[in-house]
Amino acid sequence: MPGCGRDFTPGRGRSQARPLRTQAARTRAGGAVLVAALPVLLTGVLRQDWVGGAAAGVVAAAAWRFAFPRLNGWVLGRTLRRLAAHDGLGFVGTVRLTIDDAGLREELAGTTSSAGWDRVDRIEETDAHAFVFVGPLAASILPKRDAQAARALDAIRSGAAGAGVLACASRPAPS
């Protein structure tokens, strides 16, 4: 069906999803600007030394520019090690998924995440699971074990279709 490509959000034009490298580059550049501006403002306002603040800002921005990839890699590695320690399950515990007129609400480990029907981008399925994407990388995962899961998936499909955002049929997840 036309318009059902991986980066297309039916009913809303192109998805807001950006490739991860683009997101990382923007974060690195935005962080460098912020890190450069902070010493300029602090030194300029507190010590009335705008030239010294500018020099400190340039040094801080350069340090951020070159330290960010290493820092980002460390944080990502730490997160992946934590996931691996729990067999890749992330937060372990009972998940409660509520489907109502407003959308989806997921409760896990004392944290609640909500997404209105207009945020459901797509549904991808394997033989064992259905993935309900509510963002570029955020998805609710429904195991297809029993009739209750099938009813929940049908309710999600009808809620998203009713909001006019899920115009194309579900498609299999890439293998």
Image (spheres, rainbow, N blue to C red):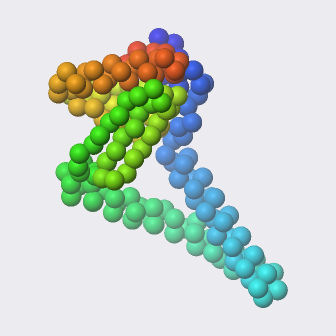
Counting from the top left corner in percent of width and height, residue 143 is at 23, 31
Extreme residue toward the front, this view: 101
Rendered view: 8 above or below 36: above
Percent position of residue 50, x then y:
81, 81
- Looking at the image, which residue sits at the far left? 145
Q: Residue 46's spot in the image, x, y percent?
A: 76, 85
Residue 17 screen position, x and y as percent: 53, 37
Residue at 45%, 26% in the rendered image: 101
Q: Is residue 175 visible?
A: no
Q: Residue at x 41, y 33 (%)?
A: 104
The correct choice, above or below, for 4 with respect to 87 in the image is above
Q: Is residue 54 left or right of residue 69?
A: right
Q: Is residue 72 above or below residue 148?
A: below
The image quadrant of residue 149 is top left
Q: Residue at x 58, y 66 (%)?
A: 65
Left or right of 32, for residue 115: left
> Is residue 84 found left or right of 13 in the rendered image?
left
Q: Quadrant of the C terminus?
A: top left
Near-viewer residue (163 or 49): 163
Which residue is depicted at the point 45% across and 61% down?
A: 72
Q: Is residue 96 left or right of residue 112?
A: left
Residue furthest bottom in the image: 47
Residue 86 seen: yes
Give the quadrant of residue 53: bottom right
Answer above or below: position of 104 versus 160: below
Q: Nearer the viewer, residue 38 or 29?
A: 38
Return the residue found at the far top: 1
